[in-house]
Image (cartoon, helix red, strand yellow):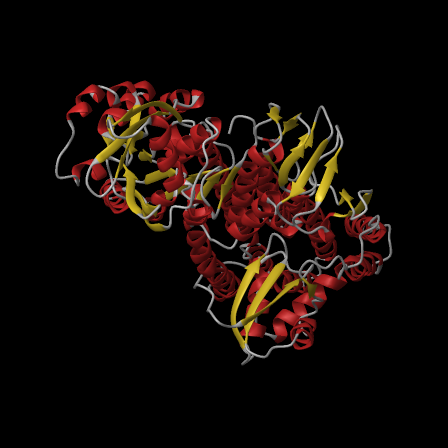
Amino acid sequence: MPDAPQGFATLRVRIDAMDCPTEEALIRKQLSAMPEVRHLEFDLLNRLLTVHHENLTQEALQKALRGLGMEAVPAGSTAAVMPAGGFPWHLVAAGALALLAEIADLATASVPAWLAPASALAAVLLCGGATLKKGWIALRHLTLNIHLLMTIAVAGALALGEWPEAAMVIVLFAVAERIEAASLDKARDAIRALLQQAPDTVRIQDENGQWQTLPAANVSTGSLMQCRPGDRIALDGIIVNGRSALNQAAVTGESLPVEKQPGDTVYAGTLNISAALEIRVTATSSDSMLARIADSVQQAQSQRAQSQRMIDRFAAIYTPVVGLIALAIAVLPPLMGELSWQTSLYRALILLVIACPCALVIAAPVTIVSGLTLAARRGIVIKGGQYLELARSLKFLALDKTGTLTEGKPRLQHIFCAPAISEEQALQLAASLEQDSSHPLAHALLSACTQALLPVTDSGLLEEDALRGVQGKIHGRHYRIGNQAILNSLPQKPDWLTALTGLTEQGNSLLYLCDEQQLLAVFAVADSLRSTSTVALNELRTMGVETHMLTGDQEGTARYIAKQAGIAVVHSQLLPEQKAKLIAELASSGVTAMTGDGINDAPALARAHLGIAMGAGSDIALETADVALMENNLQKIPELIRISATTHRVLWQNIVLALGLKLIVFGLTLTGHGSLWAAVMADTGASLLVVLNGLRILRSHSA
């Protein structure tokens, strides 16, 4: 599918009658002829159509769709454009009439001759009206779809005097369509359930200090909300009062309770277990983390996977080829004296029934969306089906160190100072320079300064480099703080540096503070390896994934953490562009993923086949990544690979089912053992089976 053109207005509508590629083809042909339409995007699973246009009105769009027998409402509308389905009494009656036609046809001697055709015609009219109408519309627009094929099959069977078969074909088709629609609704409900975990109402404190219940959609950021134990949190926010255990499974996929206290971030959909909380709202309901997850899953459906593109190409030639074969079977055997015209035409009708590729085309989206939804439930947000498919083929995984392999909460261990400055002065200067930095090492200095009750002064920030550090002016003097590059830039290194030998080999990261002339202090900061990192990396090795560490930290520190984690290949003291270059080199040898959580990881994330951002990372890393882990847990990566493998396996099962049933009918027809009702069962049954098999992923525990 070509990318949507930029700069055009969009209309997004829901069409309840659109859930099959045949309807897509009909709509595409009708709307593409309109001069205002520039691009069309179809989401069949959710029955959504996005139209990129110039000066196209909603009324004109609805009128064009109405000409195809379809009604549309704006996306997001709760209005129903199709009547709610009650008990299908008409199908029961049509089935009884079809059975009566079969009995009357068999008992020719004891029943009136008109009973079989009358019963069959009544059954066709009772349950086939919608199909026949859609078939006529398709014929008028010269579009070959399942409804036109069924119309031809029923009309042909009636013309040949095959009364029971004509009735049974239309009844079976109507029943199967109804069951298939119900199954597809389950897939849609699974996605909608992601959002429904957040309550619709919330208790908000008004200007008089009183608590009142309001719709969550009406609450703005900055409001103070209350969440009682046993309730779900309605909006993202920061705790200002109270401590409680929360179940964050809706967002992170982790069902074990997490202790939260004032200052901690909480998410909409999270279950409050033990105590009341007062929370300052930081995001509206439409911008909550839960809403962003659901939106990502929704948008991911338009990112077509390689398998979908392959199936679409095959389906484009499947129907014409089968149609030509049907035509040949209808004409050639009688002309050659091999079969009667009635037998040949009957066999051709059977092939026309299986000429629709619906089951094949729907196999991929149902399966992939189920995989995307399962991943989202487990705290893994994948931004497209192509990335879900890639994960199973992962050969190399590159990992940043700080915040990815480690906790990302380093602590200040030691301060080494020049004789002319005290530890307090050095810490105050360092914290003043780093106060606006988002790097975890900067947070360690700021935290230590706060604990020491030292004031932080304005640094007059001049420049911040993603790797080398920060420089600024304090009280008129120029200071710099950063890593080894700062030390290397000094003309002379002091003798007292010899006392620092071996610190990096013990896992410490060193930050150097200097003025314009000399080194003033060295800060040793250490971070601990995540408890889940070693388990995850061992699991990845058993899967055949080769792991590499890519970090901007000093070599000694990097090797210390790598040894603990079991990573053999270490690249240290890297600039962001050097990380990206190494990723490109790995990518030339196999499918490569990069995992990180910082701004300096964004170029490498973008260069990898699969960019994986940790959930607590920067917004730019999450934006650049193809996969976002909503929990800082590397064990989510093996889980991603398992979900990818399961999805791929089920997808190929669906392809075999869709084609296999049709091939069986094809073979039976050529050998003279086929029937119209069997063809309908194979066609609609295949669609039903691939939907149910695809939905099976949602119940998977092993993936």
In the displayed orientation, state which residue is furthest to the left.
491
x%, y% of residue 214? 79, 48
Whether 66 is drawn above or below 689: the answer is: below
Taking the spot 75% from the left edge, 28% from the top edge, the residue there is: 230
Q: Position of residue 24 (x, y in %)?
A: 57, 63
Q: Is residue 672 visible?
A: no
Q: How many marks?
A: 0
Give the image quarter of residue 572: top left
Q: Nearer the viewer, residue 604 or 107?
A: 604
- Position of the N terminus by quadrant: bottom left
For residue 540, side relative to residue 122 (left or right) = left
Seen from the viewer's position, the closer of residues 56 and 484 is 484
Q: Quadrant of the rendered structure where residue 47 is? A: bottom right
- Residue under the point 47% across and 48% down: 384
Which of 379 and 402 lies nearest the eye of the viewer? Answer: 402
Query: Toward the viewer: 678 or 401?
Result: 401
x and y percent of residue 674 in the render? 58, 48
Residue 71 visible to an observer of this rendering:
yes
Residue 550 in percent (x, y) is at: 28, 35
